[in-house]
Amino acid sequence: MKLFSCLMALLLFLLQAVPGLSMPKDTLRCVGYHGFCFHSKSCPEPFAAFGTCSRRQKTCCIDTTSNFHTCQDEGGHCVPPEIKCLQEQVGLCPHREWKCCTEV
């Protein structure tokens, strides 16, 4: 019984110590873009919806008053990495690997 308790304590420690080990991928992406997970399907002001969290059970909301603006807000288009941009710009895309382009 003591061995089982020690193993469970070690498992809980590892889940807390290793970032991202216990979070779903969509939640990690949201947090990576400095977003917050809300239970409601719509985001309160001044937040804008930016995908999902907790395996599509919550809404990822990003602050529209911060420096983190979506690509579309900046007038760009999100494209996969294999597409070459003539002109890149700053802006968040729903997929981390994608880039924000004004001209493709």
Image: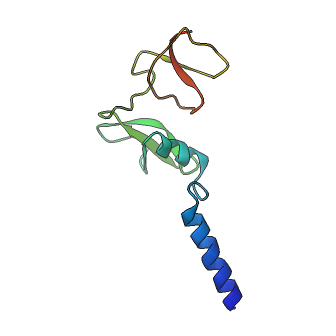
Residue 4 in which image quadrant: bottom right
Indicate the position of residue 62 as horizontal and vertical percent values. 39, 38
Q: Residue at x 29, y 37 (%)?
A: 46
For the residue pair 74 and 67, the one nearer the viewer reads as 67
Most extreme residue toward the bottom is: 1
Q: Residue at x 59, y 59 (%)?
A: 22
Image-quadrant location for residue 5: bottom right
Residue drawn at (32%, 35%) of the image: 66
- Viewer-proximal residue, 59 or 93? 93
Please indicate whether residue 8 sits to the left or right of residue 54 in the image: right
Q: Is residue 17 above or below residue 93?
A: below
Left or right of 53 in this view: 80 = right
Measuring from the top left, give residue 71's x and y in whole percent.
45, 23
Q: Quadrant of residue 80?
A: top right
- Count of number-bearing discs: 0
Residue drawn at point x = 39 percent, y = 28 percent: 69
Residue 23, given in percent of the width and then of the height, sits at 57, 55
Residue 46 horizontal side relative to residue 99, left or right: left
Choose between 90 and 41: the one closer to the eye. 90
Scheme of image coloration: rainbow
Question: On screen, 33 above or below 73?
Answer: below
Quadrant of the snapshot with the C terminus = top right
Quarter in which the N terminus is drawn: bottom right
Task: Measuring from the top left, give residue 101's x and y in whole percent.
Answer: 51, 15
